[in-house]
Every structure is written in structure tokens, then in C-alpha cells.
Amino acid sequence: MNAIPTVQIDNDRVVVTQWRFAPGADTGDHVHGLDYVVVPLTTGKLRLLEPTGVRDVDLVAGQSYARLTGVAHNVVNINDFDFSFVEIELK
């Protein structure tokens, strides 16, 4: 099952996408081509399948984090409830 992206803004400076994950949904393998900020809208755990291995991360609603271009992973909702976050990519 795939996570559902909804692009809210795409202009010359940013791409803002809301990602919604049903339980077990994932983004699929991808590499980030831009620096980005994630703003969780839900508190819970996501599983990151990375080239170096698998790790589970705890996210808290409203506690943002940033990553640089080049991050490669698949993001999976391992909660038994829907999970969502907003991703802000910087052009």
C-alpha cells in the first residue's frame, strides 16, 4: 500500500507536500533531490529502510526536523493508526 502525497504548494522556492499513511503504507524507495524539513502532524513511529539498514524513529506532532539533499530511504508507517506529516522541500 502506498502513502498518499498531496502537493499543497509548488513554486520557485519550495514544494510543500502533505503525506498521509494508512497503517503499513510506505513511500517506496526514493532519494531526496532537495534539502527538506518535515513537520509531523501525528505522534508515532515510522520505519526507515535505508541503504545502511533499518531503523525505527519516534516522531512527535509539531516537532520538526531537517535533512540534506541525498537522503535515500523508504518510509513505512508501523503504527496501527493513520500517520501524516508535511514535507517542505527547499529549491
Image (cartoon, grey):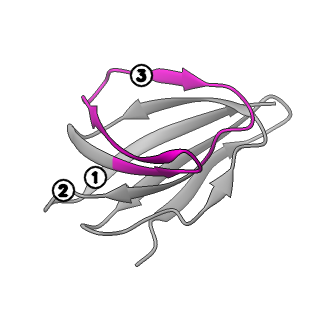
Q: Say which quarter of the image contains residue 52.
A: top right
Mark 1 vs mark 2, foreground winner is: 2
Magenta region includes residue 48: yes
Near mark 3 (Cα within 10 A), the count class, few <14, some 14-19 or many ≥20, is: some
User: Left or right: 71 with respect to 26?
Assistant: right
Residue at the farthest bottom position: 1
Instruction: Give the magenta range.
Output: 47-72
- Residue drawn at the location 31% of the way across and 24% of the way down: 62
In contact (CB < 8 Å): disc 1 and disc 3: no
The part of the image, by quadrant, that contains residue 36 is top right
* 59 lies left or right of 1: left
Q: Is residue 29 above or below residue 64?
A: below
**The furthest residue to the right:** 12
In the depicted structure, whether residue 37 falls above or below residue 49: above
Question: Looking at the picture, which amino acid does disc 2 mark?
Answer: Asn
The quadrant of the picture occupied by the C terminus is top right
Q: Which mark is residue 64?
A: 3
Q: Earlier in the sequence, mark 1 or mark 3?
A: 3
**SS assignment at label 3:** loop
Residue that mark 2 sits on: 79
Give how far across and how far down residue 26 sits, in percent. 43, 65
The Cα atoms of the two marked residues, 1 and 3, are separated by 15 Å
| Residue type, mark 1 in image | Phe
Identify the element where label 1 is drawn: strand
- Which residue is drawn at the image coordinates 18% and 56% (left, top)? 79
* Left or right relative to 90: residue 18: left
- Distance, label 1 to label 2, CA atoms, is 8 Å
Disc marking residue 83: 1
Labels 1 & 2 near each other (Cβ < 8 A): yes
> In front here: 16 or 24?
24
Could you classify mark 2 by the number of other residues whose Cα lies within 10 Å: few (under 14), some (14-19), or many (20 or more)?
some
